[in-house]
Image (cartoon, rainbow, N blue to C red):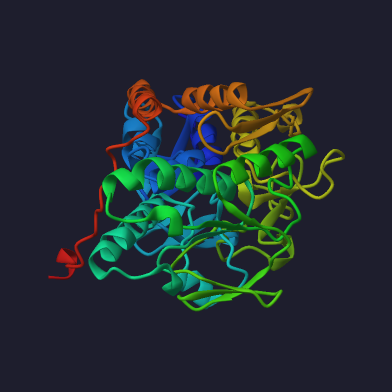
Amino acid sequence: MESREKIVIIGGGFAGLHLAKKLNNKNKKVFVLDKVNHHMFQPLFYQVACGRIEPSNISFPFRKIFQRSRNIQYRMIEVERILPEQNKVITCDAEITYDKLVIATGCKTNFFGNEKMEHLTFGMKNTQEAIAIRNHILLTFEKLIIQKKRSDDGNWNIVIVGSGPTGVELAGAFAEMKSEILPRDYPHMNFQELNIILISSTPTSLSMMSEESQAMSEKYLKELGVIFLKDELVTDYDGDKVYMKSGKTIASNNVIWAAGVTGNIIEGLNPDVMIRNRYKTDRYNRVLGYDNIFAIGDIAYMETPKYPMGHPQVANVAINQGKNVGRNFLKKDIKDWREYEYVDQGSMATIGKHRAVVDLPNFKFQGFLAWYFWMFLHLMLILSVRNKVAIFFNWMWSYLNKDSSLRLIIIPNKKNRTEQ
């Protein structure tokens, strides 16, 4: 009996998950390796950070996803190195061989080499970071109500660096939290002194979207009371003050970094295949110089006539690259493989209740219709029916009551039982 081809997928984000689902119950032996045990729906991390939905609503355990699969196995493990000459990946606990290897490790927050900034600010690229933001912001107000500190020490200011969709959505959510939720939770505190500050290195917010969306997003931010600083480059942060290239400083103990991403690189491949911390691939997502190693999603850099500088690092690219590679792997002859090309289906962002912007290929709209469209599309992308219902219920409760009951402060127990 002919042995099944062994395909190892490193990473269970959008790209890795959709590749695995294409290979589900096919004549392939598939291993999904990830250092966490669940897939995360990253577009809604900001709602976890603001206490609007629970982390479990947008997290899906791999063993549950592949519970009925006959050919997919999951391993909770972190890959440390690839040995391409031996068709093997090295982890802290095991060595795993492969016939084909797919790297789908995605991205992490880019702090541009500033280790102090990385240590003192909050990124938001995984569930733990989103929960950490929620804990820190809520703890700030719990401390303030006891210590009675004034705003001039920075405890009040919430600073968000980066004006892409993540930064804009966070700023809008915190602004609504300031006006609608916090005054009821802390009736003896004056939240007029609380500033939500969005810092942008570009002259507009949402610089990758249309001019109409840029203008409307700034209008919405202003309506919500967000302080928007344009053309300001953050150079340093010491835990108490944000320093900018213009010489200005902002006092803050609450800084969220949403100013860029960089690839999660694994050692072992030829450095010549790297560009801007992404693996250079051909049109089939095959890493240049390797016959059986592929890269998909945010970690892949593919030049095409439409995108000579590589595809944007967005979920739609990752999902469809995963699907395309999966279809190619199932074809008997490599000559039948199909090249990948990104079809831009548009982009969107929400900046609070009834405030959103949507850019479709042939149509752009903003306002309450865009907000409903954003909610519907994100709800449909959630994996399970149970999670869809839970998120819909939370959204409706928040919509009708302008409130949320999910403001739990959960601090991990520092005691490490595994070392006892």
Q: Nearer the viewer, residue 112 or 304?
A: 112
Name the residue rendered at 67%, 44% in the picture: 218
Q: Nearer the viewer, residue 248 or 396?
A: 248
Check the image and name the residue furthest to the left. Answer: 420
Name the residue rendered at 27%, 38% in the picture: 405
Q: Is residue 36 above or below residue 401?
A: below
Residue 345 % position (x, y)? 70, 28
Question: As drawn, is 219 to the left or to the right of 413?
Answer: right
Residue 210 % position (x, y)? 77, 37
Report the number of numbered marks: 0
Q: Nearer the viewer, residue 77 or 329?
A: 77
Residue 233 % position (x, y)? 68, 68
Q: Is residue 238 above or below residue 346?
A: below
Q: Quadrant of the C terminus?
A: bottom left
Look at the image and tell me whether residue 107 can be seen.
yes
Name the residue rendered at 24%, 54% in the picture: 410
Residue 346 % position (x, y)? 70, 30
Q: Nearer the viewer, residue 35 or 388?
A: 388
Question: As drawn, is 146 to the left or to the right of 93?
Answer: left
Name the residue rendered at 41%, 44% in the picture: 177
Corner quadrant of residue 331: top right
Question: As drawn, is 209 to the left or to the right of 265?
Answer: right
Look at the image and tell me whether residue 3 can be seen.
no
Question: As drawn, is 59 to the left or to the right of 413?
Answer: right
Q: Quadrant of the N terminus?
A: top left
